[in-house]
Amino acid sequence: MRSIELNILQRCGAHMASLTDLEESFLQGQHGVSLAAQGITGRMVTIQRTGNEPYQVSYGSSPVSEIANQVKSVPREFINAAGNDVTPEILSYLRPLIQGQPNLAFDQGIPRYLPTTHL
């Protein structure tokens, strides 16, 4: 028997990514390239939320050694008293992350992210 973490399923469904996901992913990559161009290595790009209304973030970095193999749990205040559901506060926190639908082209049911040529 094999278990699969939910985050793996989410990464396998990249065609379901929100516009926020795609924009932030691009900007994270851009920030990482900028760090590398400056000779800064051994760090992981981070996103820090700087505003909720409107949703805003800034990009930074932290040493990989402080992030890799670490677990960050959902804060207890985002779980209801019975422990079987989430609170309205976490829904408000998460809502900006799922906003926007990218305009994706599909080729025979498969998302086409880059132009392709057929042999």
Image (spheres, rainbow, N blue to C red):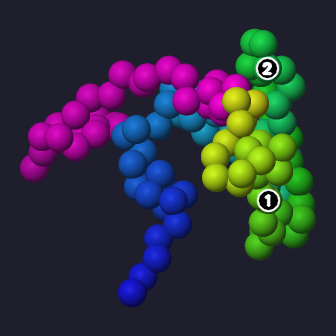
Amino acid type of the residue tagged 1 in the rendering? Lys
Identity of the residue drawn at 77% across and 73% down: 69
Please identify the residue farthest to the front as the structure is shown: 82
Please identify the residue farthest to the top as the structure is shown: 54
Amino acid type of the residue tagged 2 in the rendering? Asn
Left or right: 2, with 41 as reference point: left
Left or right: 9, with 64 as reference point: left
Dots 2, 1 in contact, CB < 8 A? no
Where residue 99 sits: x, y (%)? Answer: 55, 23
Where residue 78 sits: x, y (%)? Answer: 77, 42
Q: Does the stretch in magenta take in 117? A: yes
The one of 102 and 95 positioned closer to us in this rendering:
95
Dot 2 alpha-carbon crowd within 10 angstroms: few under 14, some 14 to 19, many 20 or more: few
Where residue 22 sits: x, y (%)? Answer: 54, 33
Q: Which mark is residue 52?
A: 2
Dot 1 lies on which element? Answer: loop
Left or right: 58, with 98 as reference point: right
Q: What is the span of residues highlighted in magenta in the rendered image?
A: 91-119
Residue 34 seen by the camera: no
Identity of the residue drawn at 51% across and 59% down: 6
Image quadrant where residue 71 sits:
bottom right
Image quadrant where residue 55 sits:
top right
Q: CA distance from mark 2 to mark 1?
A: 21 Å
| Lower position in the chain sequence, tag 2 or tag 1 | 2
57 over 14 or under it: above or below: above
The residue singled out by tag 1 in the image is 72
Identity of the residue drawn at 54% across and 58% down: 7
Where residue 17 sits: x, y (%)? Answer: 47, 37
Residue 86 seen by the camera: yes
Identity of the residue drawn at 28% across and 39% down: 111
Q: Which mark is residue 86?
A: none
The one of 56 and 117 positioned closer to us in this rendering:
56
